Image (cartoon, grey):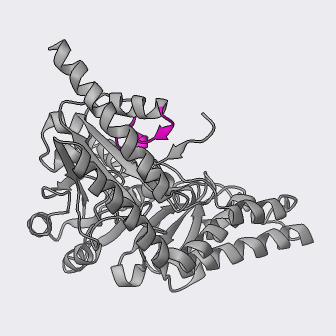
Amino acid sequence: MDKYIYLDNNATTQMAPEVKQIMRENEDLYGNASSMHAMGRMAESAIAWARGEVKSLIGASAEDEVYFISGSTEGNNTVFNTFRDLIDDGSRKDRILLSTVEHPASIETAKYLKKKGYKIDYIPVDRIGMVDLEALEELMGDDVVLVSVMLGNNESGVIQPVKEVSRIARSYGAYVHTDATQAIGKIEVDVKDLDVDYLTLSAHKFYGPKGVGALYMRHGVPRTPLLHGGHQEGGERAGTYNTQGIIGLGKAAELARLSVKEEREYLWKLRCALKKGIEERIDGVTFNGSDDYETALPGTLDVSFSSAEGESILLYLDLEGIEVSTGSACASGSLEPSYVLLATGLDIELAHGSIRFSFGRYNTMEEVGIVLEKLPPIIKKIREMSTRKV
């Protein structure tokens, strides 16, 4: 296959040419940014530039609210473990709330803490996967120390009402964390408008390099390093700086800030074209998540096909050079249906038959047309095979 149609951008994106270029230009900047010599100062200056770009992208008040990490998984673990330590120190606030549709980086950390005896409660979602604010209000109490709700869901594409979540949490004196990994670069994100205390992001989700991300921590909030060692990041995150990766993140942040409005419109057009084409060509289809511009990530379309297994659809599309996902790439390897879709009340058979199409800036309308040409006969074939087995 000479060319793949890559529609798995929620899993990871290709690096932007501008990101590759700036990383190549700085590939000889090998000095340790913690060193006082000239090479170290040059590296430190480049990292300071990248920090400023991330600050501007998310609307932080100051550069020292932005901490460089390996990615959102590390960031989410850092936040949850910060509050584990607070609880261990005897805080009267000893309960953590998170939604049932969080990324595994949050869900699995919460499960681990619960096994260790910590108080963890889950906020349910409605039929499209939106956090139930009334249920959140009922779960809240003066003992809640942290509420964690992701900004954009990696499977359903639903944009969560984080601003409203923050309002409710604040009324009980709780801190708020949002995993904004899927939202950055696709919609405008402002930490002050969302009124969150912590925000996590990963560069590789918006055309930057893998293995680098950022954790926003508002001035004055609790913080406990996950990694202990050197004095890097003000003592909040030890380890020699990944200078080239951080520079790449900085460039990706700059590009996202300058293009987010146009990208949102473009991805939405691709999504709508694919949805309309599927509706016209295939019966027995359920579209998961929101179909509203304001509450749906523009490039995400999660579809369930009745009487067709998602894994089979994925493999047949792969043979045609079309790359998609059956859900979160971070939860792949399991034959269990998506916990995100099951949390919305979706029938287990339809959850098994779900496919996630996720667009990026390098996809085209021509590619949408090819998918709409290849997909219907694949679904027909799988359904016929399923009928014969019965």
The residue range painted magenta reads 320-332
Q: Quadrant of residue 91?
A: bottom left
How many numbered badges does the structure rendering display? 0
The quarter of the rendered structure image containing the C terminus is top left
Q: Residue at x 29, y 63 (%)?
A: 149
| Residue nearest the observer in this picture, 270 or 281 | 281
Q: Quadrant of residue 213?
A: bottom right
Q: Residue at x 89, y 67 (%)?
A: 39
Q: Where is 326 relative to 101, above or below?
A: above
Image-based side of 58 in relation to 20, left or right: left
Q: Position of residue 189 (x, y in %)?
A: 42, 76
- Prevailing SS of the magenta stretch: loop
Please indicate, yes or no, whether residue 285 appears anywhere in the rendered image: yes
Please indicate, yes or no, whether residue 118 appears anywhere in the rendered image: no
| Residue nearest the observer in this picture, 254 or 2 | 2
Q: Position of residue 43 (x, y in %)?
A: 80, 68
Q: Residue at x 42, y 51 (%)?
A: 369
Q: Residue at x 46, y 78 (%)?
A: 261
Q: Where is 304 relative to 27, above or below?
A: above
Q: Where is 138 relative to 120, above or below?
A: below
Q: Per the image, is 325 magenta?
A: yes
Image-based side of 390 in relation to 200, left or right: left
Q: Position of residue 255 (x, y in %)?
A: 60, 73
- Extreme-top residue of the structure: 389
The quarter of the rendered structure image containing the N terminus is top right
Image-based side of 116 in relation to 51, left or right: left
- Extreme-right residue of the structure: 38
Q: Per the image, is 368 magenta?
A: no
Q: Position of residue 139 (x, y in %)?
A: 12, 63
Q: Where is 319 relative to 326, above or below?
A: above
